[in-house]
Amino acid sequence: MKRRPAASVFAGSEVQSVPKKAKKMIHFSRDELTGSAFVAFGIILFVGFFYAAVVSKMLPPYENRLLSAIQNDRFYCLLVPLTLPMIIVAVYLHWLSMKMFKHA
């Protein structure tokens, strides 16, 4: 992707100069911002789920009802490790179906 120089802004058919203060600003494309948002969202989800599955079990009991419910939950901490074998099976089945489709 070719970027235009930061020294000018296209307004119609004329080229206008940009103030010196704006030259120092970093400009991101929409795709870069969307990708960064997805990565940040994934990191936040990972930290939250890791806390719920592992860290909350090691802390002393809470008085807050929501945090206490997360801490006393035994289903989720077993569900997370069991997703790995299921992902492996799903990836294998996807690969197998693509091979069959390609060679049919």
Image (cartoon, rainbow, N blue to C red):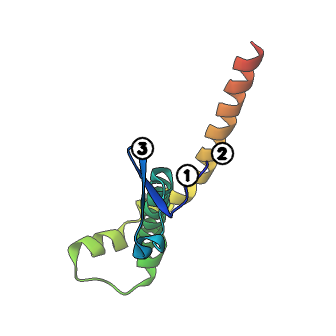
Sequence-wise first label, 1 or 2: 1
Q: Nearer the viewer, residue 1 or 32?
A: 1
Mark pair 1, 2: CA separation: 9 Å
- What's the amino acid at mark 1? Thr
Q: Residue furthest bottom?
A: 60
Residue 70 x, y percent position in the rendering: 33, 69
Q: Residues within 10 Å of mark 1 (few under 14, many from 20)?
A: few
Q: Nearer the viewer, residue 102 or 70?
A: 102
The vertical placement of 102 against 21, above or below, is above
Question: Which residue is identified by label 2?
Answer: 88
Label 3 close to label 2 by CB (< 8 Å): no
- What's the amino acid at mark 3? Ser
Residue 54 numbered mark, or none: none
Mark pair 1, 3: CA separation: 56 Å
Determine the image quadrant of residue 20. bottom left
Question: Which residue is identified by label 1?
Answer: 83
Describe the element under mark 1 as helix, strand or loop.
Answer: helix
Sequence-wise first label, 3 or 2: 3
Question: Which residue is identified by label 3?
Answer: 13
